[in-house]
Amino acid sequence: MRIQWLPLIIALIVNIACDYYIYAKLAKTFKPRWIKLSHCALSALLLIYVIIAVALPRRSIDNDGLVAIMWMLYSYFTFYVPKYIGIIIYWISKIPALLKKTKSKVPAIIASIVGAFIFISMWWGALVTRYDYEIKEVTLEYDNLPESFDGYRIAQFSDLHLGSYAGDTTYVSRLVDAINGLDCDIIFFTGDLVNRQTDEAEPFIGTLGRLHARHGVYSILGNHDYGDYRSWKSPEEKARNLQYMGEIQAEMGWQLMNNCDTCIRLGSDSITVIGVENWGEPPFSQYGKLSVAYPDLKDGNFKILLSHNPRHWRGEVLPLTNIDLMLAGHTHAMQIELDIFGLRLSPSAWVYPEWGGVYKEGGQILYVNIGIGEVAMPMRIGATPEITLITLKKAPKP
């Protein structure tokens, strides 16, 4: 993979300027030379460290190497993100002193506290929150739900990104036990089993094969499951990788739904489950074909759609169908979420109008699961890994 030298050079210049500014403040505040020398030494080591991390190959490197690069870059950011925000906070808190033309140590203290808090939060998100899954229980009511499905229990999980665990099955085994413990009628996985290539899932076949529900485990593909994020020697090798994805999921006992549907029956009643391949917007490839998966999109059947990308809901589902429930993943809430007195905030909202939780329009509902795993940054700050327990209920008659 070619290094983007201009962005790298700009980033390094900004980092050096940031470090020089902090050095100048330290020189004015502290007399011992070792404090200033320690800062210079750490800055130089971090500079060398990030150059090495960025210079390593991406698309051709094996998964363990990619995980190592991911952690290298993240550890670098845990030093510089607090520095940037600390400087911004310093100047904001310095405004009162500037207006009064006085000197104060308060801005420096505030900036230091904020920087330390961000540093700790980033490492807490990497070492604790990313393994601290949450089971979210949701009840959805429908007028047209068949009587036999009143109380039907669905477990949804999404975006495992197994490559990020470097073959360690411990955490995934805990997730499987938690899902099985819900005693659900059916289990849905809404895409992104791996990061770049199918063989990342090999160590987890036995573990994920333990998932069970009365009506089985159904899955779809996400944008990371097609092998589009690495280089292949030939189109045939890439096609083999995708074929292997289907074989692995079959070995796990999952039913992979590539633009198709199935009927779930209870007594004399039934519901339809539709699964589409990844419905992507640029730069993601467009594989999903909803009209192929289920040609009569406005019939009277109660329908559940599995589609990885929540943008599909407004793109096709709302304007073209009467699909009752769509289940999606993909957003991860950008792995950052804040809950302030019940108000959920995430940078993902800048990209996805529907990024996490329940969304309703008319009689149609979308649920976006914020996923289990991570890509790019091995952390989840507030955006706790999610298992969703959805209970379908027959709406009471007025």
Image: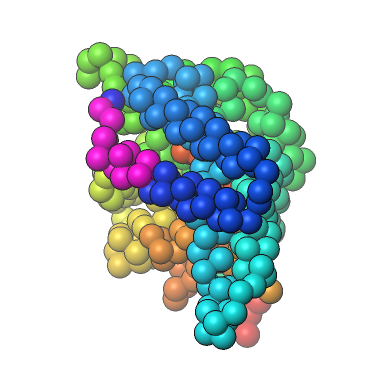
Give 274 or 285, whichever is nearer the viewer: 285
> Residue visible at 53% across and 48% down?
23
> Residue visible at 25% across and 27% down?
2
Give 201 or 256, whichever is nearer the viewer: 201
Q: Is residue 182 visible?
A: yes
Question: Which corner quadrant of the image does residue 296 belong to?
Answer: bottom left
Direction from residue 254 to residue 262 in the image, left or right:
left
Give 34 or 150, whichever is nearer the viewer: 34
Which quadrant would the C terminus be assigned to in this image? bottom right
Point out residue 180 in the picture as x, y percentages from the top left corner.
Answer: 72, 37
Point out residue 293 in the picture as x, y percentages from the top left corner.
Answer: 33, 45
Q: Which residues are drawn in magenta?
A: 2-13
> Residue visible at 44% across and 73% down?
361
Give the colouring mode of the picture: rainbow
- Residue 119 to residue 103: above or below: above
In magenta segment, residue 5: yes
Direction from residue 19 to residue 253 in the image, left or right:
right
Q: Is residue 372 visible?
A: no
